Amino acid sequence: MNALTMMVWSMASGGIAAVVVARAADLIARPSPSQMRAVGYHLSVLLLVLVESGLLRQATHPAAARLHVLQVLAGPVCVGLSNFWIHGWLGAGRRDLLMARALRASAVALPLLGLAALALPKDQQLAAAAAVSLAGSALTCWLTFRAWLIGDRLALMMAAGCLLTLPAIAGLYALAMRIGQPGLAVQAVVALCAAGSNGLTGAVLWHRERHEWRMRETGSVPTQDPLTRLHSSAALVHRMIASQKRRRRTRRQGGVLAITVFEPERIAVQVGNAGLDEVWMTLAARIQRQVGVVNPVGRYWDRCFVALVETIPSPASLRTLGLRLAASLRQPVEVTGRDGDPVRVRVDAGIGVVRLVPGHAEVEDVLDDAQRLAEAARSMASRTATDDPHTGETVPLEIAQLPPRRPRHLHAQPHESLPVERPLR
C-alpha cells in the first residue's frame, strides 16, 4: 500500500468513523436497543474496511494468522448485522413473512457460514467468505427493493445503499486476496462505494428512527392534519388509491382499520376542549405506534381515524393487530384538566377491520365498510368487529373464521373495496 492508496482508504475510513461517532452520540442522548444495533452495524462496516483494505495491517502489524481470521469473518458478520437491523427497520414481521424469515435467517446464517469457511483449506477461505458476503448483500438488496414495491417509500433509498455494498465487498475482498494489481482509480471507486453505502444506509435508517422517536416522545406523527399531525382525509384517500394500484401488481393482501371515537363531547365537558385536543394527539400516537411508521394513518373526519396496512403476512396477523390496537386504546389517557391538574380519562372507541385482497373496488366502499364495522364494534366486548368471511355476518374480530394464510382465490367481487375482500370477506 503506497501513500496515495493509504490516503484514499484513510479518507473512506474517516467518513465511516464519523458516522459511528454521530450514532454513538445519538445513543448517549437517546439510548435504545435499536441505537445500540446501529452503532454495532457501523462499527462492523468500519472494521470490514480496515481489515480488508490493508489499513489495519499497515497501522498495527497484527499476526498474520489473526488477521486472516478477521478477514474471513468481517464480511459475513457485517452483512449479517445489517440484515438484523434492516429487519426491524422495514417492520418486516408485520408486513411480509418471506421478507421477515429471509432477513432473520440470513442474520443468523451469514456469521455461521463465515465460521464454517474457516474449516476450508486456507487458500479457499477468503473466496468462500467473499461469496457468502456477496450473496447475503444481494439478498438484502432484493428484499429492500421488494419492500419498496409493496409500498415502503424509503426502501428504495435503502436498496440503492445495499446495491453499493456489492462492488464495495467484491473490491475489498479482491484486495484482501491480492487479486491482480488494482490501481489508485479502482481502489478509489471501491472506497467511495464503501463509504457511500454506509452513509446512505445510515441516513435512511436514522431518518425512520427519528420519526419513531418523535412519535414515542412527543406523540407526533407525519405532519398533515394540524392537530394530530396525521394525514388528512384527502391525503389518506390518495395513499389508498396508490396502494390499490400496487396491490394489483404485487397481488398482496392488506388491511384497513377504522377507529371511531364515541361521545367525545363527554370528554370535552370533563376536561375542556384543550384536554380533548390532547386526547386526539395521544390516540393518534398510539394508533401510529401499533400499526408502525411504515403504514399511513389519517384522520378521516373529526372523530374517526383510518389506518392502512398495505401488506400483511397473514389474515391472522390482521386480527392480532386489531386486538392489540383495541387494548392500547382502552388504556386511560392523562391530560391537563380545566384547573391545570392532570386528569385521566377513558376513551370509548370501536375498531372496524377490513381485509384487502387484490381486485377492483372503490376506496370509498372500503372506508364505508370500515366505518360501519367500527360503529358495530361498540356493542362488542373487544370493541373490534369484522365481517366473517364464511357467513358474511358482522362479528367480533376475535371469533371471525379467518381464511388460511394463502387463500386459493384472491380475486374480489367487482363491488368489493380496494384490492379487497370487504371486511374480511
Image (cartoon, rainbow, N blue to C red):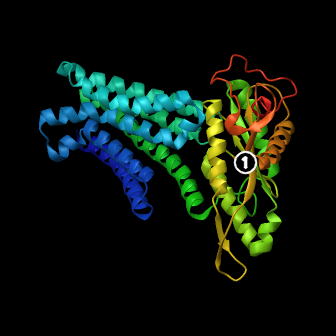
Q: Tally the numbered discs.
A: 1
Does 238 sit left or right of 168 as displayed? right
SS category of the residue bearing label 1: loop
Residue at mark 1: 383
Task: Please tell me in which quadrant of the rendered image residue 118 appears.
Answer: top left
User: In the image, what residue occupies the spot 23% across and 19% down?
Assistant: 124
For badge 1, the amino acid type reads Arg
Query: Residue most toward the top?
Result: 408
Q: Is residue 183 visible?
A: no
Name the spot of residue 9 as percent of width and height, x first.
31, 43
Q: Which residue is found at the position 74% from the left and 64% from the top?
A: 227
Vertical position of residue 416 compared to residue 335: above or below: above
Residue 392 placement (x, y as % from top left): 81, 29
Q: Quadrant of the N terminus?
A: top left
| Residue shown at the point (49%, 38%) measured from the top left | 87
In the rendered image, the residue lying farthest to the bottom is 339
Q: Is residue 69 above or below residue 30?
A: above
Q: Is residue 119 visible?
A: yes
**Foreground pick, 32 / 374:** 374
Q: Looking at the rendering, in which quadrant would you find the C terminus?
A: top right
Q: Nearer the viewer, residue 279 or 327?
A: 327
The percent coordinates of residue 237 (x first, y second) are 80, 43
Label 1 environment density (alpha carbons within 10 Å; few <14, some 14–19, many ≥20):
many
Q: Is residue 49 left or right of residue 357?
A: left
Residue nearest the observer in this picture, 259 or 127 = 259
Q: Which residue shows up at 60% across the image and 35% down it?
A: 95
The image shows residue 414, relative to residue 379, as above or below, that is above
